[in-house]
Image (tube, grey):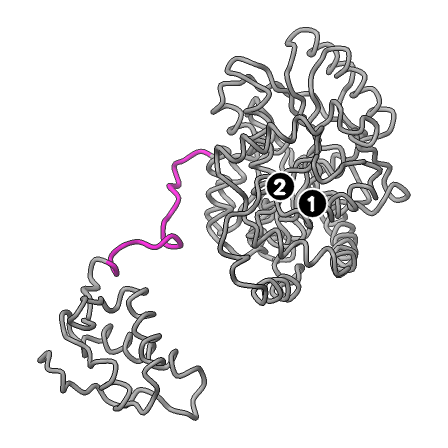
Amino acid sequence: MRSSSKLTIGNMVSRDSGGSLVEQIVRSVACRIDDKLLRTGSRMPSIRQFADEQKVSRFTVVEAYDRLVANGYLESRRGSGFFVRERASLINTPTAHAQEIPSSQQPDVVWLVRNMLRQLPPQKMPGSGLLPHEWLDGELVANGLRAVSRLNQSLLLHYGTQQGFLPFRQQLQLKLAELEIAAAPEQIVTTNGVTQALDLVAREFTQPGDTIFVDDPAWFLMFGTFATLGTKVIGIPRLHDGPDVAKLAELAALHKPKLYIIHSVLHNPTSTSLSAAKAFQVLKTAEQHDFMIVEDDIYCDMHPGSAVQPATRVAALDQLNRVIYLGGFSKTLAANLRVGFIATSRETAIRLADRKMLSSLTTNEISERVVHKILSEGHYRKHVDRIRGKLDSARDEVTNRVEKIGMQVKYRTPAGMFLWVDTGKDTIALTEKALEKGFLLAPGSLFSPHQLPSTHMRLNVAAMADSGVWDFLEKELK
């Protein structure tokens, strides 16, 4: 095909078809390139010529050409125009979704996280830690994004502030007050989710060789994070109402930990919550052995209140002197909204904000503005009420069915999204078989810092609607 400026490529748009004129042009040109009707190196009509031939505005053509460049179909040569780009190298490059996880890799923390990020349908991932998309409110998030986009554009173009968007921190002050935790905005530092919050706190308070206590079982991702810092991670057995405080005191005297990471409310993976007596004893032990308590309350808004399930936050007893409180919104709003926060003493907040600045400058103020908008307009409370209602229905049904097929539920709790079940079989082997069938389970070995074989596994009650999951479990657990 000659590269003459008089080249014509046929009609590409219709006012009667669906999609914008830009989308129609992009789709038509891309198809012609994929079908080799427009060959590599061919020069596209000039913007003016294309606009005249298709009877569209030049602005429409400019936007269409820009999109085709962005998607690798065209290349722009300064002063010469637009040319069809070589596609072979792009087509042969595996996409993120096409990459296969080696079947020979034994399940570990990295294995589970990698598989969780493969974008399997939520109903195929009963081992995941997220709610199904249909349980969340995409329109609520979209409305927040639209509202933020209508702001003065200059507000969206600069860095955020060191500690985080001030109106958002003021809103968090009100939220924490409802939990009987007094925290001024100066005591709050926003983060890219609880994961970054834990990393900042661990880096601030520990050095290589120091000891960090965690619950056992506990959220697995932090084990790897702490290992990269050169710290020693020791598990404290988790009971139905909190940690084994006798074991906590014994190990604290022996190892002199710097931090104890605890899930007080809706513990992951058991959905148990801390009793008032246990909360008091944990705080007393921390004072006696001089370690800090890091209270991860990511599932805070899924808790129905102490009238349904007794729960005490250590931060409410301590008022952020020895306790560092963490929270976030990825579980209830959207995993892609990486908005978390740390509430602590003023002095510690300043140090953590400096550390955050040195590692990542600032957090994403656009996301913080979106979450602030959702919280401040009052829609969030109704949203989480609906989530709790759905969890209640699913939990009862899944618990009964799990027990019917022979699994034992360690703790029957009236709240939360997880069941900690005993299958009676090695759950690593069970997980490997499940993945071959297209299902993702979460073996119990991953939830212990010892990573020893286990017959336990975590089930997400919101992700158990697929009949194939039940068929697989019934067959394997006979």
Q: Is residue 265 left or right of residue 432?
A: right
Q: Residue at x 49, y 22 (%)?
A: 229
Q: Dividing the picture into quarters, in which one does residue 325 lie?
A: top right
Q: CA distance from mark 2 to mark 1?
A: 8 Å
Looking at the image, residue 36 lies above or below residue 154: below
Quadrant holding the N terminus: bottom left
Q: Give the x, y percent position of residue 357.
A: 52, 35
Q: Quadrant of residue 421?
A: top right
Which residues make up the magenta segment? 90-106
Report the disc number at residue 190.
Answer: 2
Disc number for residue 169: 1
Residue 95 lies within the magenta run: yes
Nearest the eye: 407 or 109: 109
The 10 Å Cα crowd at callout 1, few under 14, some 14 to 19, many 20 or more, is many
Please tell me which residue lies in front, 88 or 258. 258
Tag 2 secondary structure: strand
Residue 448 image position (x, y, % from top left): 60, 26
